[in-house]
């Protein structure tokens, strides 16, 4: 059994929330380029420090940097049966590089799931998002609050707002998404792997829509 799925959608659409749960359910790793880049920035590696300059203002990190990261990650043993890709690809150049990478391994994408969420709801989700400084867990002040305000349920770490969830960076990210990432909808539609799901509703409603788009993740 293997499963190679992309979660595609604007910032704040709920990709990370869904990928975390469903990757576990499907027994494949959750590969999130944003998380990988933030972790590299936290460890102050040269790559992380370079990436942070782009991320904090809301623009994309250069293609060759993320393509390199994903190539290395997918070569690890736990990804041999697939992965849920969250936040990658984000440009046509990245999608082409991913196609090459999969072809070299004799594999292919099973499905690209596009999360359809209105702009108003994206803004509500992004401005209310809080993340744990310790373990990276994601919360929302209204829709998914922690048990104790400002404190992570899992590790007791302090919750904070991402720098790029501030007003200026959010506006940039939505523009960057519209110009650089939306061409991927046609890219994958043409290849007949695109499923559009309604990204609004409860976390469980959205998960159910994704399971049905992916065929319960039992592709072979
Ligand atoms: P979002 O909430 O917008 O989905 P992510 O955590 O996926 O945020 O990404 C945060 C930032 O990391 C992006 O704004 C961008 O600077 C960088 N990043 C993440 N993935 C990629 C990618 N595939 N290509 C280029 N930059 C990326
Ligand atoms: P992305 O990875 O696409 O940027 P996240 O998964 O981080 O998005 O979700 C963005 C914010 O919206 C988070 O604060 C999360 O708790 C919240 N969220 C996620 N899914 C839902 C949902 N179905 N309904 C309401 N809020 C949600
Ligand atoms: Zn935590």
Image (spheres, helix red, strand yellow):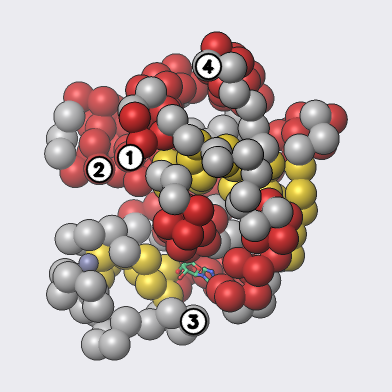
Query: Disc 3 to disc 2, how far (Cα)?
Result: 26 Å
Q: Is mark 3 within 8 Å of ligand 2?
A: yes
Residue 17 picture location, percent across and down: 47, 63
The residue carrying mark 2 is 39
Label 1: how many residues lie within 10 Å, few (<14), some (14-19) or many (20+)? some
The residue carrying mark 1 is 36
Residue 141 picture location, percent across and down: 40, 80
Dot 3 or dot 2: first in sequence order is 2
Residue 65 sits above or below residue 217 on the image = above
Dot 4 or dot 2: first in sequence order is 2
Q: Residue at x 42, y 68 (%)?
A: 129
Q: Secondary structure at mark 4?
A: loop
Residue 66 sits above or below residue 125 on the image = above
Q: Residue at x 70, y 65 (%)?
A: 209
Q: Secondary structure at mark 1?
A: helix
Quadrant housing the N terminus: top right
Q: Name which quarter of the figure residue 36 lies in.
A: top left
The residue carrying mark 3 is 143
Mark 3 near mark 2, Cβ–Cβ under 8 Å? no
Comparing 13 with 177, the one in front is 13
The residue carrying mark 4 is 105
Mark 2 near mark 1, Cβ–Cβ under 8 Å? yes
Q: Residue at x 38, y 72 (%)?
A: 139
Query: Disc 2 to disc 1, how far (Cα)?
Result: 5 Å
């Amino acid at each position: 059994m293997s499963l190679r799925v992309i979660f595609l959608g604007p910032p704040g659409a709920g990709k990370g929330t869904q990928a975390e749960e469903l990757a576990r359910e499907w027994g494949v790793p959750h590969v999130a380029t944003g998380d990988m880049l933030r972790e590299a920035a936290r460890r102050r590696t040269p790559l992380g420090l370079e990436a942070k300059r782009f991320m904090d203002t809301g623009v994309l990190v250069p293609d060759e940097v993320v393509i390199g990261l994903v190539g290395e990650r997918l070569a690890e043993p736990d990804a041999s049966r697939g992965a849920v890709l969250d936040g990658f690809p984000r440009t046509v150049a990245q999608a082409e590089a991913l196609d090459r990478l999969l072809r070299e391994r004799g594999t292919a994408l099973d499905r690209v799931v596009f999360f359809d969420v209105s702009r108003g709801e994206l803004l509500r989700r992004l401005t209310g998002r809080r993340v744990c400084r310790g373990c990276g867990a994601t919360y929302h002040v209204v829709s998914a609050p922690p048990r104790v305000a400002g404190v992570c349920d899992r590790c007791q770490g302090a919750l904070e707002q991402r720098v790029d969830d501030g007003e200026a960076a959010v506006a940039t990210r939505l523009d960057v998404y519209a110009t650089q990432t939306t061409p991927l909808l046609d890219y994958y539609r043409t290849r007949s792997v695109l499923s559009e799901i309604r990204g609004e509703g409860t976390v469980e409603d959205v998960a159910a829509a994704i399971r049905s788009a992916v065929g319960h993740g039992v592709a072979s």
